[in-house]
Structure formats: C-alpha cells, structure tokens
Amino acid sequence: MSGRVLPGPDQRGLFIGGRWRAAEEGATFTVRDPADGSVLASVADGSVRDAVDALDAAVAAQQAWAASAPRDRGEILRRAFDLIRGRTDELAELMSLEMGKTIAEARGEVAYGNEFFRWFSEEAVRVHGRWMHAPDGASRLLTVRKPVGPCLLVTPWNFPMAMGTRKIGPAVAAGCTMVVKPAELTPLTMLALADILHEAGLPPGVLNVVPTSRAAAMSEALMADPRLRKVSFTGSTPVGRQLVRQSADQLPRLSMELGGNAPFLVFADADVDAAVDGAMLAKMRNMGEACTAANRFLVHADVAEEFATKLAERMGRLVVGRGQDPGVDVGPLIDERAVHSVHRLVTDAVRDGARLVVGGSTVDGPGYFYRPTVLLDVHPDSAINGQEIFGPVAPVSVFTTEKEAVRRANATEYGLAAYVFTRDLARTVRLAEALEYGMVGVNTGLISNPAAPFGGMKASGFGREGGFEGIEEYLETTYVALPVTGRHGG
C-alpha cells in the first residue's frame, strides 16, 4: 500500500462550506483495500445533522452562485481539469487502492471522468432560452433557463471519480450548488476531488461532500427538506425505487441511473474476432462491475461455438491479482458479498445445464478475487440471465433468428445498454429501433462518451448524463409572455 496517495487526515473529514471538519461526535468508518481486506483509512461518518448542515451551506451559496458569470463557472471546471490531468498517476493509484481496479484501468477512468469537466466547462456558456412569435402574432414568447437549485448527488462505488465528475460538472456549469454523498466503500477519490475543486477556486458552499455509513437516513432527511430541488442518483434499481418514493412529498427533480442487464448480440454475419474484442471490452471493464457491462451473450447458432472458444481463450489468459501490481489484468471484486453473489450465479447456471468453458472459481488467499469465466449453452431462464452479474462472467446462449434475438434481448425489466455485432446495415437499423435500451453499441464494446447522453429506460431509470442533454437535467424553464398589441399597439 502506498500511503502517499491517501488523503491526509484533514482531507478525510466532511467538506462543508469550503472547509474540512469532523463528523458529529467525531464518528468515523473504515475504508478497506479489496485486494486483502486491510484498512486503508478512517473517514468521517456524517450524520443526518451533518447532512442538513451541508444543505444549509448549499442553500446559502445558491443565489450568488446562480448569479455568477457562466464564463467564470466554466473556467473553474477547466482549472480543475488541468489539475486532475497533472495528478493522473496519484489519483489512479488512490482509486486502485480503494476500489481494486488495475492502475491502467484507473488511469483510463481518470481521463474519462476528467473529460466531463472539460465538456461542461465549454457547455457553461451555451445555456440559452428561446424567443418566438406567438402563432396569433399578439405576443412574444420568451423562455429563460435557470439553475434548478441545491442538489443531492449520490455516487456509486464502482466508478468513484467518473460518476462524480459526470454529476458535478453539469451542476457547476448550470449554476447549482450541491451535497455529494459518495459510496461508503469508495469515498477517498471523491474527497480528493473535493480538494482539487477547492484549489481550482470553487466558492465555499457550492460543493459539499458528506461521506456516511447511514445513507438511507441521510437521503430521507434531505429529500424531506423543501429546499432540496434536485436529486441525481447512480446505483441499484431497488434503492432508486426507494428514492423515487421518498421524493413524492417535495417533488424534487430526479435523475436515476440504475441497474442494467445488457444483451450482447452476435449474428451469423458478424466478424467473430471483432465481436470477441468487443466482448472483452464490454464484459471486462472494471472486472465486470459496471451497469453497462455485457450481461447476456446471445450468439447465433452458426458462430456460437467459435465465439465461446475464442472468448474463453482470451479470458483464460487474463492475470488476476492486486490492481497495483505490474502485469495484472483483473483486480479484486469490491467485497466478499460480491464474490459470493457471482459464484452462486455461476454454480446455479451450471446446475441448470450450462457448460463451464473456463474459470468458475474463486482464488485462494486474501482478497475478493474471482477467475474470469465463460459459460456456454446457458438456459434462458437461468438466474444468471435475469440479474446483473457484476463480475467477470460471460454466459453465452444460442439463438437462431433475429426475431428471437430481439425478443430475448428485451425480455428484462432493464433497458440501459445493448451491444450488437453484425455487418448488415439494414439489420442494424431494425435493431436500433427494436431494442428497448437507452444506448446501443454497434460493432463496439465501448459506448460511454462524455459527449453522448448516458442513460436508460424502464427499470434502468430516467434522465441523461453527459452530452448536450446532461446540463438540461440541472436547469428549469421559465416562460415569459410579452404582449405587443393592445391599447398601445398597432
């Protein structure tokens, strides 16, 4: 473990009103290294009272921040972008320590996450309304865009930086203040990010960060407060549903980026080698711990054996180990519960008749490791096809017709991401229209892009992050009626 990258004792507290402070009664919780279970750091454990203090700070800063020049807001994000780019190695090692991903992948997340700051630094000056004639010509219709107000941003453990910048960037650009609740398992990267934004000149109270082990109580209290006007949540669908229920009384604006069950469709005319390359990206990013991860591999009968054999060969060569070690391809899962969940899904699938091609076991020794796994002939009704795996497991099933592939791809409550490999342009158009997903990757296993709208439908949530749409989630619209005819008109 490299202690030099861990936030100092002062930066492991709550960040409220532009300063670091201890939690109520000095409460703390521990953050552990998933590679061996050792304690990395103790972090302030915010209470409901602390969360309300953070909202107080956000509310106090909101009016002045909303009135600030868009160019100034953009320049702060740009300075933060430059600072992050200069500290890529430090941030990547910190992220690898607390979350487990390899250093190479962590560097990739720093670069990807940082692009949201660059993108929204440019979008800050492009918020605009509309001026038009009313159809009867008697008035002019003016629309004005304004910040929605104080926000609660809840980020997950699997992408501790990118999921933060994807929410903070547009909030800052739009002129919103915020309370950020990072995941209990991985708060250190967010605390480092708060320090960077402070250094970049973000005014006190605009960003407030409250790590806590009592997330449910905190969110319930804040969502009952009428001063909170926006909630953006990334996490599981059950928790998202609970937050939607909690929002009923105060009716804040909501963005929900929830679970996924992504199909990966390979047709008979596909370039199988390219499909395997895409599968490695879509499945193994972040050890499979991603809501966009390919979860169900639906492969045409003509190429299923070839695809599974080549995928298993690639998966079997991956090196499993501590994310900071040279040559490692696959780090640990986030905790012991994750390992048990993945292994249960694999063993149940084998019991249901699936053929284990490679992997299918844990790794001896400390840490939460699971071997990259490929299953073939997975029964459509097997549990592994019905829920997020969130691990390095690729279950392959066979289909014979396009209609069957679409039916099975859509046979889930989720609708976040889907992947299609085919060389038939007409089929591509048909699938893009037929698949019930917010994002479809065609002949690629990587679809996330800061310039594109990220989000899903059905039980995968609503709202979009990134792209031109991302800042819209943080803006309200006021319509102004301006009569131009009457007593003093022509």
Image (cartoon, rainbow, N blue to C red):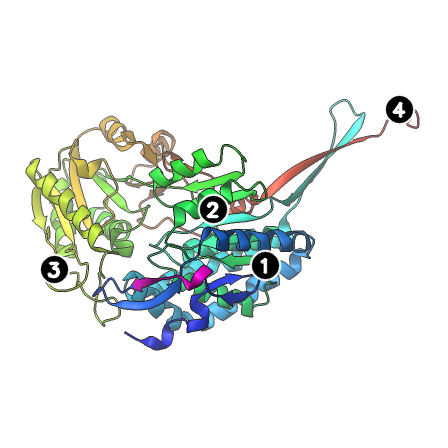
Task: Name which of mark 2 and mark 3 comes first in the sequence.
Answer: 3
- Nearer mark to the viewer, of 4 and 3: 3
Question: Would you say residue 87 is visible in this rendering?
Answer: yes
Q: Which contiguous range is marked in magenta?
A: 24-31
Q: For the C terminus, which image quadrant? A: top right
Is 28 included in the stretch rendered in magenta? yes
Q: Is residue 241 left or right of residue 349?
A: right
* Residue count near mark 3 (Cα–Cα under 10 Å), binned few <14, some 14–19, many ≥20: few
Q: Which residue is mark 3?
A: 363
Residue 123 visible in the picture: no
Label 4: few (<14), some (14–19) or many (≥20) C-alpha neighbours in 10 Å: few
Q: Position of residue 285 (x, y in %)?
A: 28, 54
N-terminal label among 4 and 2: 2
Q: Residue at x 10, y 53 (%)?
A: 361
Mark 2 = which residue?
Answer: 465
Work out whether 345 lies above or below 88: above
Q: Which mark is residue 163?
A: none
Amino acid type for the residue under numbered disc 4: Gly
| Mark 4, residue position | 486
> Which is more foreground, mark 1 or mark 2?
1
Work out how far the residue at label 1 is from the one at label 2, CA to CA, in angstroms: 23 Å
Q: Quadrant of the N terminus?
A: bottom left
Ranked by sequence position, the earlier of labels 4 and 3 is: 3
Q: Is residue 137 above or below residue 212?
A: above
Lower sequence index among marks 1 and 2: 1
Residue lying farthest to the top in this orientation: 136
Q: Which residue is mark 1?
A: 205
Please name the amino acid that badge 1 sits on: Gly
